[in-house]
Image (tube, helix red, strand yellow):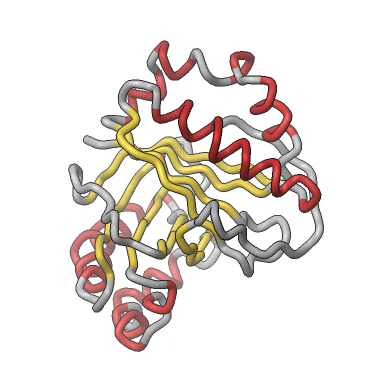
């Protein structure tokens, strides 16, 4: 079963240029040098409100166990480079999920995707079975059939907050929210699931492919936080 390391980050505005230089020139190459890291890609939400996670990174793994190997552990925590420590310690937001791909278990991302829709959330334990049945038998098939949805995948991080992740590779950001997309969300079963999850945290965001040659716009005000990638 393939794995996914998902990180959501946001640097303070005065440090954004340095943060992106660090990510592109040091951090991503370092991660891709670790055995078991298959690929990595960055995404950005240029319109994100401050502190809500402007940047997303998706690291495709041979399995979730890659994050337990000596090769990976030699690059995290106290083993961070000085530049990594500087950039990560100043992040105004950092969130991380180490997950297993649960549907379909071996699918790879579509390299042609220019946008990514993230659905990350949870369900009360007593409704977990129904939620997964709905997601696997109705929700994913309907969204996967929407025009210009290139790939639809599910992931689970048992220790994540929230635990469940849906990633949808799109041709462009306009696919999410299009009439066919909205129609796929309007079934009676989907409305029932909405009522069951209304008290749980859900992150629903559309990101576009990050282009280091065309830096995104910046806006908002900083907060404080830190983490590990």
Q: Is residue 86 left or right of residue 112?
A: right
Q: Quadrant of the C terminus?
A: top right
State the image coordinates of residue 84 (x, y, percent, origin top left): 64, 28
Residue 227 vertical position relative to residue 205 in the rendered view, above or below:
above
State the image coordinates of residue 227 (x, y, percent, origin top left): 64, 33
Query: Residue farthest to the bottom?
Result: 179
Residue 212 vertical position relative to residue 73 in the rendered view, above or below:
below
* Residue depicted at x 70% and y 41%: 18
State the image coordinates of residue 225 (x, y, percent, origin top left): 73, 40
Q: Is residue 157 left or right of residue 101?
A: right
Residue 67 vertical position relative to residue 90 in the rendered view, above or below:
above
Q: Is residue 70 visible?
A: yes
Residue 46 vertical position relative to residue 29 in the rendered view, above or below:
below
Q: Is residue 187 visible?
A: no
* Residue depicted at x 25% and y 65%: 150
* Residue depicted at x 81% and y 59%: 221
Q: Which image quadrant is residue 89 in?
A: top right
Q: Quadrant of the N terminus?
A: top left
Q: Nearer the viewer, residue 85 or 94?
A: 85
């Amino acid at each position: 079963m393939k794995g996914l390391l998902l990180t959501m980050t946001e640097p303070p505005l005065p440090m954004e240029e340095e943060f992106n230089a660090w990510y592109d020139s040091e951090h991503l190459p370092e991660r891709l040098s670790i055995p078991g890291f298959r690929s990595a890609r960055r995404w950005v939400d240029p319109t994100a409100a401050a502190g809500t996670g402007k940047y997303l990174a998706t690291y495709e793994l041979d399995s979730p166990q890659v994050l337990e190997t000596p090769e990976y552990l030699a690059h995290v925590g106290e083993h961070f480079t000085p530049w990594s420590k500087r950039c990560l310690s100043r992040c105004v937001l950092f969130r991380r999920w180490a997950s297993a791909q649960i549907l379909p278990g071996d699918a790879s991302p579509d390299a042609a995707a220019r946008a990514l829709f993230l659905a990350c959330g949870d369900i009360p334990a007593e409704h977990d079975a129904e939620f997964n049945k709905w997601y696997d038998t109705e929700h994913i098939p309907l969204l996967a059939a929407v025009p210009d949805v290139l790939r639809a995948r599910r992931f689970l991080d048992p220790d994540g907050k929230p635990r469940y992740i849906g990633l949808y590779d799109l041709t462009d950001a306009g696919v999410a929210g299009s009439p066919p997309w909205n129609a796929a969300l309007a079934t009676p079963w989907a409305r029932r699931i909405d009522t069951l999850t209304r008290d749980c945290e859900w992150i629903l965001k559309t990101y576009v492919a990050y282009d280091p040659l065309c830096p995104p716009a910046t806006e908002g005000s900083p907060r404080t936080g830190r983490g590990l990638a």
